[in-house]
Image (cartoon, rainbow, N blue to C red):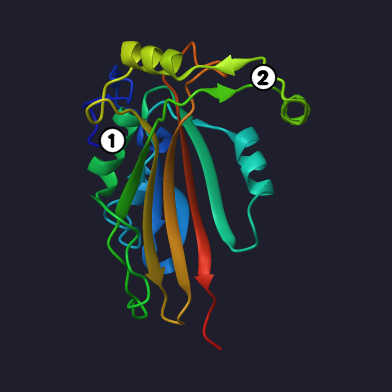
Amino acid sequence: MRRGKTAHSLTGAAVSAPKPAALRTWALAAAAAAVTTTTLGAQKDKTQRADPIHIPLGAIHDSKEEARIRVGMDSSTRWLKVYRVETTPEVTLTYIRQDLGGARGPRPDSAALRPGETSPITYTVAFHKFDDQCMDAPASSIAASSTGTACRVWRRGADKRQVLLNLRPIQEPGAWIETVVFTWYSRDTNGELIRLRLELRDTGLAADWKHYMPRTQIVASTSVVTPHAP
């Protein structure tokens, strides 16, 4: 981004271009299988990739959610960062694709990667479903099933569809994005295979599915698939 230009955040609002020291970016160094936080000035360093993943303007580091997700991860996870942006997954996907690239499809093949190679980037999309779901607490649900009592509190798929229809752009006919997962692999010169993953999660729905606020969680991580060769 050049000085003096006007930038646009993911919410579509125009903002003044920040000073280089204030602009945060993600640079995924695939060959080194590491993700580092850089400034705009660092992007000019030839040791950085030419196509860093820019943290969207207005993104908020969610340290609380990051800590919660870490609890469920195993020791293979090397790096994890969690952010949130106040916009829809559709807008976030467009931004990330323009910056990162990638083609929609299954995970790339990692078996054929030779030392020093990085796979193509692919992504998968999962859309919201509209089945009714019981909202009873787990203990209540177990008791209900054992006695034959019907669910007492429901969240309705019809409510979910209506609130999304009112407030969300449609990605495909009758479909709204729930999650998007970008995946690619890198094998270093010692044979270690690393998976790089960027996940977008729609987190804007209220628990009862009757209200919606545009919000997307961004989860970026790297994990070891195959350790260094002995």
Q: Which residue was labeled with disc 1?
A: 95
* For residue 212, side relative to residue 154 (left or right): left
| CA neighbours of label 1 inside 10 A, class few (<14), some (14 to 19), many (20+) | some
Q: Secondary structure at mark 2?
A: loop
> What amino acid is at disc 2?
Ala
Total number of numbered labels? Answer: 2
Coordinates of residue 130 in the picture (x, y in percent): 42, 25
Figure check: 180 above or below 43 = above
Closest to the observer, 32 or 192 = 192
Figure check: 217 above or below 36 = above
Residue located at (46% from left, 55% from top): 35
Q: Earlier in the sequence, mark 2 or mark 1?
A: 1
Closest to the observer, 46 or 155 = 155
Coordinates of residue 108 in the picture (x, y in percent): 32, 63
Figure check: 88 above or below 114 = above
> What amino acid is at disc 1?
Tyr
Q: Which residue was labeled with disc 2?
A: 150
Closest to the observer, 207 or 181 = 207
